[in-house]
Image (spheres, helix red, strand yellow):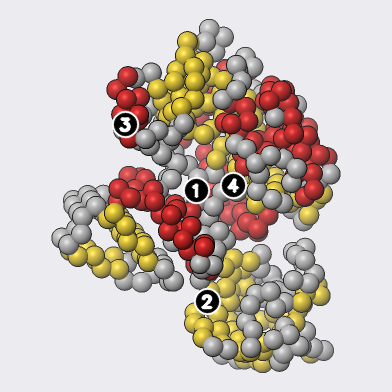
């Protein structure tokens, strides 16, 4: 039986701030290994038994996701762009429709992109078991044996075993994320598993149940797919049609209402990394039970997670804390309050702080740039342009730019001029002059850009030509 992985990669991961931001959410970050969570998910389903995956994501992540797919060596993946966020039910419907159209008869394996599963063989064995239930027209979930009275997960109460699907059981009921007392009761009474948020089904069965319980979601997804258009290597869903979908999770839309819900045991390790304490759990610990990442010095500290993304971070005399430092923000929290980081993000959002939206490093289809310094009427960036790539032909109304080549070779278009720049050479781009920077070489081009002017926002860009299909004028 062929299996089509459909990977949902549109979440924001606000509980892992300050590392996870709106412009670079947790699924795109290397949190517990040198691969991002999305890449780890893709590699888990890259065996011959799986068809090429469908990745459903927010359109703002498209180039970063495409680059991560190439870096992981995944071939044949489809990247489907959601014009607006509409939760997992709509994403599942789109994936089911596309899978049914491209490979009739294949099962859909619906996966979040931000889970950690190290036992790939155990995971794939569980998929084989769930496939038996899906072939028998059940909507399968994967249940995780609870190891603690966790309050961050939903639970499933197990029903009777299913004769037609060996190793599977009916879902008696879904239990919302409980408080501490209820979680302890569920653990003590037994017969409950954590709901992993992974699903497997025949597309026709899921779409039929969706039509019964949430027909507006199905209609919106079908319209968005039928009117979708190809954009470079992406499938861009129709905005107006997709926006009509109710914003509902697959659990609320179908799984908690259908009589076809069933579950099989996940025979592997699992974590959804929903908090910094979960990151601490997933990492190796030192003799003092600390998990350390980056340039860190600890003294008289126990049971803590300390992560530095660049700068030296020292912690003295603290136990059971979370300390995360980035170039522009620092988080210090009690480990048992790590679930409440979202409240900090909400407060920053209310204040309009940019630190929740973007990191100091911003990815673009041509490479990336890092903000080094900024002040009144100036900003300094380190810009990296990939081999063969180029920025758009553009101009700025409010700022001038001075470029200094650090390494590599740049081809500069400035007005009617086209010329090369080499290491330690520089040029000046006046306000209002059309310009483009290209990398004709075989190594990354790095330049220091010094901007000056009365307004330095990224929206002061007028594009005339762009090979990546971005809006001509921003």
Q: Quadrant of residue 451?
A: bottom right
Counting from the top left corner in percent of width and height, residue 29 is at 49, 55
Mark 4 to mark 1 CA distance (whole Å) = 10 Å
Q: Which of the numbered marks, if any, corresponds to residue 9?
A: 4
Point 41% across, 39% down: residue: 152
Q: Which of the numbered marks, if any, corresponds to residue 181?
A: 3
Between residues 19 and 291, which one lies in front from this camera angle?
Answer: 19
Q: Dot 1 corresponds to which residue?
A: 37
Q: Quadrant of residue 400?
A: bottom right
304 relative position to 115: left or right:
left
Mark 2 to mark 1 CA distance (whole Å) = 25 Å
Neighbourhood count class around disc 1 (C-alpha, 10 Å): few under 14, some 14–19, many 20 upward = many
Residue 353 appears in view:
yes
Local secondary structure at mark 2: strand
Whichever of callouts 4 and 1 sits on the residue coming sooner in the sequence is: 4
Whichever of callouts 4 and 3 sits on the residue coming sooner in the sequence is: 4
Q: Nearer the viewer, mark 2 or mark 1?
A: 2
Mark 1 to mark 3 CA distance (whole Å) = 32 Å
């Amino acid at each position: 039986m062929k299996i089509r992985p459909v990977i949902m990669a549109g979440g924001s991961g606000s509980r892992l701030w300050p590392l996870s931001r709106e412009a670079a959410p947790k699924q795109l970050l290397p949190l517990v290994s040198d691969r991002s969570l999305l890449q780890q998910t893709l590699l888990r389903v890259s065996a011959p038994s799986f068809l090429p995956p469908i990745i459903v994501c927010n359109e703002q992540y498209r180039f970063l996701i495409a680059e991560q797919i190439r870096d992981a060596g995944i071939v044949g993946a489809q990247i489907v762009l959601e014009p607006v966020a509409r939760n997992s039910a709509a994403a599942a419907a789109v994936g089911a429709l596309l899978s049914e159209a491209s490979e009739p008869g294949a099962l859909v394996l619906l996966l979040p992109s931000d889970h950690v599963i190290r036992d790939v063989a155990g995971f794939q064995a569980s998929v084989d078991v769930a496939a038996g239930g899906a072939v028998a027209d059940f909507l399968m979930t994967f249940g995780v044996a609870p190891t603690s009275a966790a309050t961050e997960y939903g639970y499933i109460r197990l029903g009777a075993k299913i004769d037609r699907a060996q190793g599977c059981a009916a879902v008696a009921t879904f239990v919302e994320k409980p408080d501490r007392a209820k979680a302890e009761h569920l653990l003590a009474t037994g017969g409950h598993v954590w709901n992993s948020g992974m699903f497997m089904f025949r597309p026709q069965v899921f779409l039929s149940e969706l039509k019964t319980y949430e027909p507006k979601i199905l209609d919106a997804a079908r319209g968005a797919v039928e009117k979708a258009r190809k954009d470079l290597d992406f499938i861009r869903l129709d905005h107006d049609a997709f926006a009509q979908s109710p914003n509902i999770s697959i659990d609320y839309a179908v799984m908690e209402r259908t009589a076809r819900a069933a579950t099989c045991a996940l025979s592997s390790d699992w974590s959804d990394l929903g908090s910094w304490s979960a990151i601490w759990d997933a990492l190796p610990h030192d003799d003092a039970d600390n998990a350390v990442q980056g340039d860190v010095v600890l003294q008289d500290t126990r049971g803590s997670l300390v992560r530095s993304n660049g700068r030296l971070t020292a912690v003295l005399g603290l136990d059971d804390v979370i300390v995360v430092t980035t170039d522009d923000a620092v988080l210090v929290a009690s480990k048992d309050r790590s679930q409440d980081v979202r409240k900090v993000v909400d407060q920053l959002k209310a204040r309009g702080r940019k630190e929740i939206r973007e990191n100091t490093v911003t990815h673009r289809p041509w490479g990336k740039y890092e903000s080094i310094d900024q002040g009144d009427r100036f900003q300094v960036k380190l810009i990296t342009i990939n081999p063969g790539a180029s920025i758009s032909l553009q101009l700025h109304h409010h700022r001038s730019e001075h470029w200094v080549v650090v390494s590599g070779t740049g081809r500069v278009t400035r007005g009617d001029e086209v010329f090369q720049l080499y290491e330690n050479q520089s040029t000046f781009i006046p306000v209002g002059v059309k310009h483009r920077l290209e990398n004709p070489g075989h190594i990354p081009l790095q330049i220091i850009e010094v901007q000056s002017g009365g307004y330095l926002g990224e929206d002061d860009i007028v594009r005339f030509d762009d090979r990546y299909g971005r809006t001509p004028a921003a």
